Image (cartoon, grey):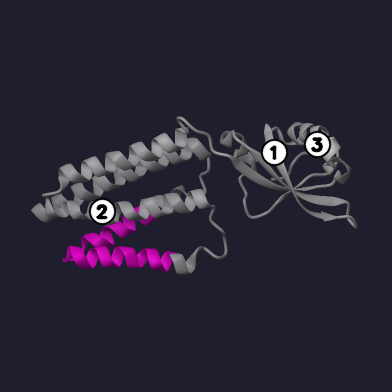
Amino acid sequence: MGDIVTLLLSFAFNFVVAFVLVRFIYYPATHNKRYVFTFLAFNSVIFFVLSFLTSVEIGMGVGFGLFAIFTILRYRTDPVPVREMTYLFIISALPVMNSASSSGDLWIQLIIANLAILTIIFVLEKEWGFKYETSKRIVYEKIELIRPERRAELYADLEQRTGLKVKRVAIGKVNFLRDTAELMVYYDDIEQESWLNQEASPVLLYPDESVDG
């Protein structure tokens, strides 16, 4: 009975930390529900897998072996953005670390370590003291505006049509047959990209139409 109570307490502690990370740090920063199920499911399953192993050394080896499997799979059918991959790594690492709580001797160290992780991620997401520069690739049809002397008009048009405060623009491939150019638009306010959060495909801008993200 004591082992069951210890297991449940360890799981509750690990799940609460993961839930706080996903619900109160990740979600408010991205407003993206697509990965919430994946994060919490991975965290719970990995914790129970490691908890049922009798050796801590074997448990750590299996935990990092799971990371190797993730590297091989890489969700090839649905590319995962770098931010979500980082959260997935943290969510997967938490049960590897917290499964050591079953020994009963490391609670203080684990509490400190988990609080430190939550604090660091929270500070990074709040961008205290610095700002992230975010980018979005756009297929743009007004190629006459990509000329250096019309750069101000290009910025104004992009800001009016995307709603983003553009910092700078990098010009990529230019297709004169279709009168389009690939632009990489850079901006600071990450909250504005919630509706342009599909990294797999570029945004295509046409005259007098809204952005279709």
Q: Is residue 183 above or below residue 80?
A: above
The residue wearing badge 3 is 151
Q: Amino acid at mark 1?
A: Arg
Q: Badges 2 and 3: C-beta atoms under 8 Å apart?
A: no
- Mark 2 surroundings: few (<14), some (14-19) or many (≥20) residues within 10 A: some
- Gap in angstroms between the C-alphas marked 1 and 3: 10 Å
Give the label, 2 or 1, closer to the camera.
1
Which label belongs to residue 83? none
Q: Looking at the image, can residue 24 be seen?
A: no
Distance between the Cα atoms at labels 2 and 3?
51 Å
**Residue 17 horizontal side relative to residue 160, left or right:** left
- As helix, strand or loop, the secondary structure at mark 3 comes to helix
Q: Residue 191: which quarter of the image? A: top right
Q: Residue at x 82, y 54 (%)?
A: 174
* Residue type indicated by callout 2: Met
Sequence-first tag of 2 and 1: 2
Label for residue 168? 1
Say which amino acid is labelled 3: Arg
Q: Which quarter shows the C terminus?
A: top right
- The dot on residue 97 is 2
Measured from the top left, where is residue 166 in percent x and y? Answer: 69, 35
**Local SS, label 1:** strand
- Secondary structure under the numbered disc 2 in the rendered image: helix
Residue in the image at 24% along x and 50% along y: 11
The answer to whether residue 179 shows anywhere in this view is: yes
> Does residue 70 lie above or below 211 as drawn?
below
Q: Which residues are magenta?
A: 41-70
Circle 3 crowding by C-alpha within 10 Å: few under 14, some 14–19, many from 20: some
